[in-house]
Amino acid sequence: MNQSLIDKYNIPGPRYTSYPTVPFWDESSFSAQNWEQTVLRSYKESNEKEGISIYIHLPFCEALCTFCACHKRITKQHSVEVPYIESVLKEWQLYLKLFSKEGGEGQKPKLKELHLGGGTPTFFSPANLKTLLEGIFQTVEIAERPEFSFEGHPNNTTYEHLKVLYDLGFRRCSFGVQDYDEKVQKAINRVQSFESVEKVTNWARAIGYQSVSHDLVFGLPHQNWEKMEHTIRRTLQLRPDRLAFYSYAHVPWIKGVGQRGFDENDLPSGEEKRKLYENGKKLLEELGYKEVGMDHFSLEKDELYQSLINGNIHRNFMGYSSSKTQLMIGLGMSAISDSWYAFAQNEKSVEAYQSRVEKGEIPVFRGHILDEEDLLIRRHILNLMCRLETSWTNEAEIPEIEAVVERLEEMQADGLVEISERAIRITEKGRAFTRNVAMAFDLRMLRNKPETRIFSMTV
């Protein structure tokens, strides 16, 4: 990777798990009522055909990982589990009530995808997770070949967690590894041994999980290539079916004290960080992994890679998925939902979330209703993030297409994209700059350029 390209394109930019991205949502035109209208519209259009997805945010962690930018609640008090589960199930009942409006009564939602995220889902006991999930499952029809997955912490995921979730239909699990170097682990307050990861990985496979994923992060404090290579080679001893190879997003101005558990001088420079990725990518590919979209790798046999080949890969707030549904309902504190026509986020504190649910209110506090222009741009950014290319049959399909192409001409001169009459393709050289390419389409951001830094660096 040419250092001059890094210097030119390493700028703050979104990760595009949505379009528009959260900082550019038009909250002034959003209300709980119009959110519910878009949910009902999407449910009617898609439930019978493809089903829906549910994301459940389980926010509790026993310790603070200082690299984490997620919404979480740090506590060792497991008495919080049952009240929180009760709130999530009450919230789900509010959506069931909404689905039953205008002739939908008696028709159960068809559940295609379910993901437990966090926080730390395995903070919850296996018994309480079973109570939560059975409370959902008794109200839905399970789709054919559903995709149920969860995130586990290697230090507190037990055999019983894995067995209970497997018996409930889960076939994919992911474990946060980040890095195996002790100095790096101490800096980010995430100390876990290779043996812990090996144990839970082997348990999952023995039980029958079809896909085991590990998360690695590059750009963490004290990392260099020697340490990163050690982590990758140790990871590959276990040969996970999927790997997320994330760039560390250093955004302490947003997340506050959590990400200041180390000196910023300990972070790799832009050039050093890019080398971590480039060398890591090369090593992963040499050892049989295929790059999928941005930040993700998988073995050829895994469904994620197969979905890329078949053109079914999708990206949303849960990351990359091997299938898509038009409607995704986020349950729990701070969870984000997507009705395709709108986004909505739940209250960001446990107390505010539970209070709204107890009042019988769907607990969204902000969101965005997509207009026609948003819907057009969203499709093209999704194409770029998932397939590294997008095309159109006429200029009306991309608002301000001439300006979009003009913004990409320098990237074309640098060999990062190929522009034809009605298509744009990101080259292999340009993969590392996928976010920059997507930014050329981002009219919301271009029209309302932030006065302060709100995103992590793209490289």
Image (cartoon, rainbow, N blue to C red):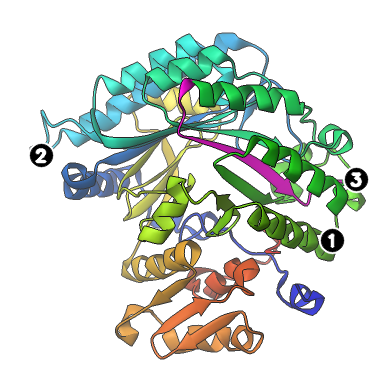
The residue wearing badge 1 is: 272
Indicate the quadrant where residue 369 lies. bottom left
Q: Residue at x 32, y 46 (%)?
A: 35
The stretch in magenta equals 207-221
Quadrant of the frame with the C terminus: bottom right
* Badge 2 or badge 1: first in the primary sequence: 2
Q: Given the image, on which type of amino acid does mark 1 rest? A: Glu
Q: Nearer the viewer, residue 157 or 220?
A: 157
Mark 2, mark 3: which one is toward the viewer?
A: 3
Task: Indicate which disc residue 102 carries.
Answer: 2
Q: Given the image, on which type of amino acid does mark 3 rest? A: Asp
* Badge 2 or badge 3: first in the primary sequence: 2
The x and y percentages for residue 31 are: 35, 47
Q: Decide if residue 171 is on the left or right side of residue 218.
A: left
The residue wearing badge 3 is: 263
Question: Whole-Å distance between the Cαs marked 2 and 3?
Answer: 57 Å
Q: Given the image, on which type of amino acid does mark 2 rest? A: Glu
- Identify whether 262 is placed above or below 456: above
The x and y percentages for residue 74 are: 67, 24
Indicate the quadrant where residue 153 lies. top right
Residue furthest to the left = 103
- Identify whether 287 is placed above or below 398: above
